Image (cartoon, rainbow, N blue to C red):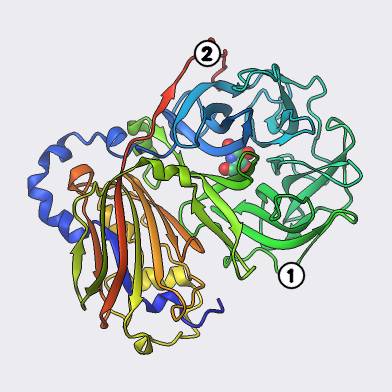
Amino acid sequence: MESSVHWEFLWLCILLVGNGVEGEASHQTCRSLRSFPGDQLYKTAYHFQPPKNWMNDPNGPMFYLGVYHLFYQYNPYGAEWGNMVWAHSISYDLVNWIHLDHAIYPTGPFDINGCWSGSTTILPGGKPVILYTGIDAKNHQVQNLAEPRNLTDPLLRERVKSPHNPLMTPGDDIDPKFYRDPATAWQGPDNIWHVIVGSQIKGQGAAILYRSKDFVNWTRSKHPLHSSANTNMLGCPDFYPLDTKSSEGKHVLKASFNSHDYYILGDYIARTDKFSVTTDFTSDLQYDYGKFYASKTFLDSSTKRRILWVWVKESDSESDDNSKGWSGLQSIPRNVVLGKTGRQLVQWPIKEIENLRTRNVSFQNKKLKIGSLLEVSGITGSQADVEVSFDLVNLKEAELMDPIWVDPQLLCSQKKASAQGKLGPFGFDQSRSSLREGLDKTTYGAFVDIDPLQENISLRSLIDHSIVESFGGGGRTCITARVYPKFAYDKEAHLYVFNNGTQTVRISRLNAWSMRNAQIVPVKTRREPKLHKR
Ligand code: DQQ
């Protein structure tokens, strides 16, 4: 963190529903306590969710013949993980979705125990092919290929699996439990295909590199593209260039481990097949410092955007999920670019989501005195898009960074939003709106690399019933949280801006919108495939 001022001193807060509000309202909301229809209360209105059951990783997202495709890990039989298939949905705008029949499900010895995560590669000429992990008859992880049956169908409703499956199997030095999640492949200047597969070898995370002339016969390279003592199983690797017109130069390598998605930036030289980095995976560089795992990007060829999808898991218990009948959702797709400093990525919700904005409230230049709490009324607090920026009236008063404050998450969990600093605090406090017992109420925290002498401090939050996705400093730092309000839901949800510091701050601008529902509907195109519950 090299900016001159750090956010932990800026004790400004925009807060979704205060705990006091919930407590005071308790005697008026007995109705909700008697029958607690969590399945409906917490279901999102404009985030992607299947109609029921368990969902996890996004798989093989792509744009094909004018249609966006999202596949995802899905359990057709219940709200807990298991029986993995690739479910399939399509969209024309990345906001409204149509669910189709499952795309990939167990059919042969190479995937009979499950079809796990993988990626799409668009071959020259435009054919989208899928590499995915199959759990074979011996419960080993192997890599398989599936191709569309009919390339003229923009919905790509049917696939054929390669007669050569499995194409890749773990070598003697690889534990078959740690060998999965093939990334999108890329072609070198010599036309050779390259792909990485996530693994753990001798206790270190490894992005194993394979090469192929024909996408069917793959040879393992002597050295992984990257290995790391900082990770265990290097899950769901993603490797992509930051220049959308080149397959060389500055690249991102993302790995999922310890429940978070970490990335490193480095230079990839195609001629030597070397990815050189100056640092390894550390907690400093994460896509998101909240609930966010197993993400996957794709290049949207229609707009040349790199788009990021991610699984946002629940923070409630397994029995809550079973009574809700569902678990897991996808973040709003985010556009990812390299930030101006070149040191980190910047993410922003795709602009199409703004089409759902409706009733608007906005104001400018409002002073927030010490201890004040300002309600943003006139919009739906439980389903909103809020942008706010703050101007520090008296920056000279900011506290200096204490060198022992190296872990922002620890700092935020110790201080909480109500602890009075000089300028601050700033952030959402998930526990305030989730008073129910048995929830994971981790307080998230992260630094934001900004210079408040040069720019205002900004925060955008997408609020959708049980999820809050927040983007600080124009997307330099992101935190996603799940919330399960016991009282403050639907019309009872209120939105406040507050200042718990000892200095006045100014809201330079606030713009908030209620959000309409996205249309997410099932369409049955053919009969449900026969699945064998395990
Ligand atoms: N989920 C998949 C695996 C992947 C994990 C199985 C990450 O392929 O490593 O559902 O959440």
Q: Quadrant of residue 231?
A: bottom right
- Residue at image point 19% right, 51% down: 378
Q: Quadrant of residue 415?
A: bottom left
Up/down of 478 relative to 1, above or below: above
- Residue at image point 60% right, 36% down: 59
Judged left or right of residue 286, residue 23 is: left
- Residue at image point 57% right, 12% down: 530
Q: State the mark number for residue 525.
A: 2
Q: Please provide percent x and percent y for residue 403.
A: 50, 85
Q: Quadrant of the N terminus?
A: bottom right
Q: Is residue 331 something one can see in this rendering?
A: no
Q: Separation of disc 1 and disc 2 at Cα? A: 50 Å
Q: Quadrant of residue 50?
A: top left
Amino acid type at circle 1 is Thr
Judged left or right of residue 214, residue 512 is: left
Q: Please provide percent x and percent y for residue 193.
A: 84, 40
Q: Identify the residue position indicated by label 1 in the image.
A: 278
Judged left or right of residue 260, residue 388 is: left
Up/down of 441 relative to 218, above or below: below
Amino acid type at circle 2 is Thr
